[in-house]
Image (cartoon, rainbow, N blue to C red):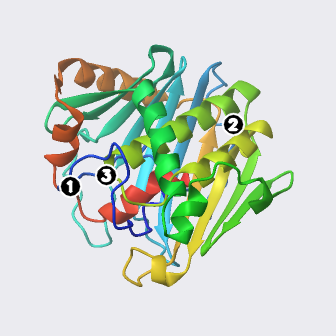
Amino acid sequence: MRSSILPSPLTSPPQALPPGPRRSVSAVGAVACLCGIALLTPPASAPAQEPGTLRVETTVFTGDDKEPVARSLTLFRNGIAWDFLEPVVKPGGKGDGGGEKKTEFVLHDPARQRIVLVDPERSVKTHIDTLRLERLRASLGTWARKSDDKVMAWAGGPDFTSAIEEDSKSVTLVGPRVRYDVRFEPAPSADAAEEYSRFADAALLVKALIHPGGLPPFPRIAINRRVATAGGIPIAVTLEMESRVSKFGGRADVVRSEHKVLPSLLAGDHKRIASAEERLAVAESVDLATYAGALPAPPGAAGETAAPALR
């Protein structure tokens, strides 16, 4: 929805959380995402299309790896997006032993101008109002444009028009040592395209707030706007950068993602949302610094942190 894979400059961006261990948030979403095929018309076995619903599975890879570093599932219903960070089991790794997975999730509720991060494992939650994200957007852009780092200054925007090439199915944005390639297909409706774009932008800003120091989200937000204007939803995203700015220690300088899209929820999705609503209701409210700083980063956090950038 990254990018987080670029190193931070000498100073931290404004409104960043204090340093300390952080857990990645899908949006983490997010987000960004090549092997998969978007299913924008439900197959015969899929349920009939439900108005106001959308289902997006996101899988993130690094380099030429066949195994993902991050997965997320985003369910849209009644104007609300539920973004679930899915566990990634490595080959030969142990499963969770069965039972329902208590995965971290994020509630995007634009009508109430709020985003809620929930960790069911610790039964805690934290709220971020959209005004805080808008303030971050303004201050982060100003800070980035003043950076001595050429990539950071470019990523601060605000205008990427000259750097964008597009056609009816793709958008490419090229900057100093950075290249985004995004393929998209028509969304089920114009409203769905706008709703997904709004969610992806918010996921990028949440990531920038919780994991400061990476590439500012404005290049990807500019791409989101182009795709939404074309009435599309991304189905594949590739982010390339020179290895000297890669944060994966030379392991990869390419992050790629797949999006599998359905215009309706599956039978179990409604139950999952109901379960998330229950966990949201009982979780203890904590401030954002406590939520983000008190939890250790899980294995593969670098890749998971990159997921929202690939929305």
* Residue 95 x, y percent position in the rendering: 24, 58
* Residue 292 x, y percent position in the rendering: 22, 44
Residue receiving disc 3: 24
Find the distance from the CA under tag 1 to the CA under tag 2. Answer: 45 Å
114 left or right of 137 in image:
left
Q: Residue at x 73, y 37 (%)?
A: 187
Among the 4 quarters of the image, the one containing residue 120: top left
Q: Residue at x 48, y 73 (%)?
A: 66
Q: Is residue 257 above or below residue 130?
A: below
Between residue 189 and residue 202, name the one nearer to us.
202
Q: Is residue 198 above or below residue 70?
A: above
226 left or right of 204 in image:
right
Find the distance from the CA under tag 3 to the CA under tag 2. Answer: 32 Å
* Residue 225 x, y percent position in the rendering: 70, 41
Q: Nearer the viewer, mark 1 or mark 2?
A: 1
- Element at badge 3? loop
Find the distance from the CA under tag 1 to the CA under tag 3. Answer: 14 Å
11 left or right of 179 in image:
left
User: In terms of sequence position, does the residue under pointer 1 or pointer 3 come before the other?
Assistant: 1
Q: Amino acid at mark 3?
A: Ser
Q: Is residue 20 above or below residue 43?
A: below
Q: Residues within 10 Å of mark 3 (few under 14, many from 20)?
A: many
Residue receiving disc 2: 42
Among the 4 quarters of the image, the one containing residue 170: bottom right
Task: For residue 207, say whether it is visible.
Answer: yes
Residue receiving disc 1: 19
Between residue 278 and residue 31, name the one nearer to us.
31
- Element at badge 1? loop
Q: Amino acid at mark 2?
A: Pro
Numbered badge on residue 179: none
